[in-house]
Image (cartoon, grey):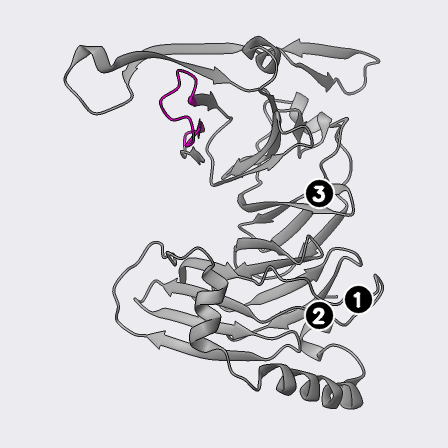
Amino acid sequence: MFTCSNEGKFVIRDLINDDADDSVKTYLLDGPISCAEVAVMDDNMRILIAAGGRDNELKLYDVDFGCSSSCNLNRLYSVEIPNHNINSMVRFANDLAEMRPLRRSSFQYFTTFSEWKRLVPVFVMSSTEDHSLSSMPIFNWISSVAFVEHFGKRMVCAGTQYGDLIIYEAEQPYTHETETAFFHLSQFPINVLHVFCSGRYLLYSDTMSKIGVLDMDSLKVVNFYDCLKIGPSMSCRIFTSSSPMARVSCNSEVSRFSPIYVLATTLDGNIVVYKLHNNNEKELKLIVQEAGIIPDLEILDVDSYTALDSVFASPEDSKCVSNKRRRKGKMQSGISEESSEFG
């Protein structure tokens, strides 16, 4: 389990061996942090952290648990100085240590020594020229982030406060490159990124009324749902099925996935449940008005999707979707006009 504060304090806790001496690891990232995500590497001894926030561009941190702490702190970070044929290798390392109790207690024997280690990013979203000129301000505002692993390729996706979605490759060596894809999806912040169907699709949502599905093979928006009553959003949870779906060709503009459930709470005190189909149809399954301000909401079940499906599923869903898709194909021969303006 990991948590991250707005100031950049990143804490990893081992829930299985919670009583071990090294069950809690604390690191410092470049703040402020609005969102953070972790990807486990192939050898299970390394993790890749993606984090960003207001005026804090997307950065990747590579942490290796198999080596000593100094190896993670003393990575070489290359900065290219413009107009000079010089590569300046700058070494950043900073250890902060203090005495702090892990548990709330007045007894002194509960006090232990904890090290805070400042990590050095191995990838920065801005260009090297912008990074080397410290006087230039950074105007990126990262509001959501997600890792996508599909067909052995790892990518990192970042949503911004200005409605943009930016995709980068997240493979070694971590060097600055132009983004793999850039989309302007909304005039409102992209606050949710959700990966499903084994990395084939990426769902995005803004804070007001729009949800879309991006095909990671073709890098096109294949589904779009508008005028949803999910905003102004306080929290938004996405629930998708883990069952495998029939394969669709990489160049196909037709998506195929089980219905998606959206559970959202709004600033005006509503709780909303939507069911989204792969033919761009949406169903408002539940709305609870004046429930109060709810900053976050979760379903306490081992399989949240099955729990929602048992309540809101209809026996006619599969039959209805296939018939509607055929009628839609006769009329438009493809995806709806709503999503084509974003393709």
Q: Residues within 10 Å of mark 1 (few under 14, many from 20)?
A: few
Q: Residues within 10 Å of mark 2 (few under 14, many from 20)?
A: some
Q: Is residue 2 left or right of residue 186?
A: left
Q: Is residue 148 left or right of residue 233?
A: right
Disc 1 secondary structure class? loop
The image quarter containing residue 128 is top right
Residue 22 included in the magenta stretch of the image: yes
* Percent of width and height locating residue 156: 66, 42
Disc 3 secondary structure class? strand
Magenta stretch, residue numbers: 7-24
Of marks 2 and 3, which one's residue comes earlier in the chain? 3
Report if the CB atoms under discs 1 and 2 are less than 8 Å apart.
yes
Report if the CB atoms under discs 2 and 3 are less than 8 Å apart.
no
Disc 2 secondary structure class? loop
Nearest to the observer: residue 110 or residue 234? 110
* Percent of width and height locating residue 43: 68, 28
- Per the image, the residue denoted by label 3 is 155
Separation of residues labelled 1 and 3 (CA atoms): 21 Å
Which residue sits at x=58%, y=54%?
194
- Per the image, the residue denoted by label 2 is 256
> Which secondary structure is most common in the magenta stretch?
loop
Note whether 193 is above or below 80 in the view shown.
below
In the picture, which quadrant includes the C terminus? bottom right
Q: Amino acid under label 3? A: Met
Q: Amino acid under label 2? A: Arg
- Per the image, the residue denoted by label 1 is 248
Viewer-nearest of discs 1 and 3: 1
